[in-house]
Image (cartoon, rainbow, N blue to C red):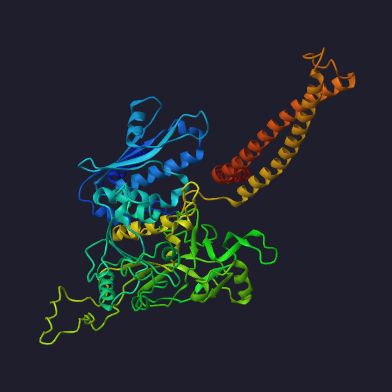
Amino acid sequence: MSARRYAIFAALALFIAFVSANVIANSWFRAWRLDLTEGQLYSLSEGTRRTLDDLSEPVELKLYYSRDAAAVSPQLQAYAARVREMLQTFQARSHGRVRFVEVNVEPFTEQEDQAVELGIEPYRPFQGADPIYFGLTGANAIDDQRIIPLFDPQREAFLEYEITRLIYELENPNPVRVALITSLPIDPASAVNPMARSQNLFATEMGRLLDVTTLAPDFSEIPDVDVLAIIHPGQLSPQQLYAIDQFVLLKGRAFVALDPAQFMFGSETGFDPFNPVAPVPPASNLDPLLAQWGVAMAPSVVADFERGLEMPTPDPTTGQVVGVRQPLFFTVPAEDDALNREDLMTAWLSRGVNFGLAGGLTYSERPGIQVEPLARTSGATMRMPAAEALMRPSPFDVMRMWNQGSGRIENIALRVTGDFETAFPNGAPAATTAPLAEGETAPPPPPPTSAPLTRSATPAEIVIVADVDFLANDFYVDPNNQLTAADNASFVLNAIDVLGGSDALVSLRSRAASVRRMDMVDDMEADALRRIQRRQEELQGELQETEARLAELQERGRGSGFFAGNLGAELTPEENIEIERFRARALEVRGELRSVERDLRSDIDRVQALVVFINVWLAPLLVAGAGLFLFWRRQRRGSARR
């Protein structure tokens, strides 16, 4: 075979192999992914894979996105590509149960009407711009629908959770069922009655969003629900503690809020469903369950000097009312990792959570149990006996007691995960019975309904908070407009909602963002922005001064008598020259301001172009240059040999 024919056959064989490899890859390995990115951006979490595997009927995901209108926002375009890739990954991993469709929404079209009707929220990057639709709808086989009205790039870390949650709700449309144990005036049932007296806002929201069953004070068992919520339970009997123990071992989902010094609810109403005569007890605990879970709450309260909430207080020296930070009432801000930024329960809270006379939680290492702080104080803290804190000392009194060397970071909220052992190894405690009258015989004990559990049948997920006063309206609701100023209620409702999801959903965590910050570029942009802003401020000041002087001269020039309306008639020639000079200067300053803004944009564009060149073009150019150099060197050696 000649060399030419051999080359033709070889090329044909390579072409056939290339086409065959593509056909086989598309047919057999379509769902395969090789994700080499940091943080596994293009891989689904185990919880999402389990949710997709458990789907019993097909789901259609429809992404509404305005491609043309979003062209003015490169950041939004990049996030749209991320959302699209994530949805394609869902479809590829679902074994045909999830179908992904994208709808390009243009203004004044049928697609726009459809998006609006479904509840997709339009977004305008600036006034007068075309609306950008960027949301998702999901529908199952019976046309039950769920929507994500708008994908916010700020929430990229929760993108996988939001899509998985939407699919989970299509498969499980019923609201989360909650059993509530509380001694506080929290009545979610009144949320459905519009004529009911306005009560605690958290209770209203709880009743509106969740299916809540409030247990009677003498409850002996806990119904089959998704989550058990225990909020300042008061005094519980051993049998009731045993019922809680068995629920946690069986179902594993509980939200617990305790307090060493509760004062807000008791002072408002004195309501106590467990004992309507007595006031609400100031302290609550859940031992021996808490100890069995490896957690302890001290009987004292925590004061945080650095994050104390400011409140008007009479100055003891002058008598004047001044704003002073009260360390007993403090906030846990969203910044500085005081709220856990990795956990779905707290990561998207942006306004912080306010606490009052809260306790401090400690925990000990236990095999098979993981503890994760959700809310923590600053390091400038002090513990105070609960009895002294309930006397409402002023901020000045607290500062006089302050021990400067005693500060440490305190845990106010924890998430406890793992397999627990029962706190009642000897089985159910004996029920207390009333004394028998003469001649009466004790009734036989009721037969056990099921064998007691000694270990967790389901991995437990428990949230424990060492405060209940933070649920009072005064801690997070603005009394003037009834708007929430902190995320107190959101934190609890979010935690219960996450706990009420499937095991797979609860296991999801926030993901790393796909947009990688480039510190050098950010620093250069910040430096250019500061420099230009300084010049802008100088020019703005000069412009205002010039315009003010110009307005003054013009006002004088208009006159008030015979020369009224004849600008400049009452001014001297020097003042008229000055007016013209100010007018010219004002035009110059406005031109300089526009030039400064252009310089800022061009500086940023120059830096971005440099980064693109380094990342995209530099490596190929270096390789090409090296190849040309080697080619030139070989040619030169060949010429020298000849």
Vertical order, 557 against 344 (above or below): above
Give the quarter of the figure containing the N terminus: top left
Q: Which residue is more in the foreground, 605 or 133?
A: 133
Vertical order, 537 against 594 (above or below): below
Q: Which residue is more in the foreground, 480 or 329?
A: 480
User: Horizontal and vertical percent for residue 492?
Assistant: 39, 59
Q: Which residue is more in the foreground, 198 or 228?
A: 198
Image point (42%, 60%), residue name: 471
User: Horizontal and vertical percent for residue 261?
Assistant: 45, 71
- Horizontally, residue 496 falls left or right of residue 320, namely left
User: Horizontal and vertical percent for residue 185?
Assistant: 36, 61
Would residue 188 be visible to someone looking at this image? yes
- Horizontally, residue 244 falls left or right of residue 436, namely right
Q: Residue furthest top?
A: 562
Q: Which residue is more in the foreground, 380 or 137?
A: 380
Image point (75%, 37%), residue name: 541
Would residue 30 be visible to someone looking at this image? no
Write down the quadrant of residue 309 in the picture.
bottom right
Write down the quadrant of residue 621 in the picture.
top right
Give the quarter of the figure containing the C terminus: top right
How many marks do you count on the picture?
A: 0
Vertical order, 557 against 307 (above or below): above
Image point (58%, 64%), residue name: 326
User: Horizontal and vertical percent for residue 420?
Assistant: 31, 74
Q: Residue furthest bottom?
A: 438
- Horizontally, residue 67 falls left or right of residue 559, namely left
- Horizontally, residue 18 falls left or right of residue 485, namely left
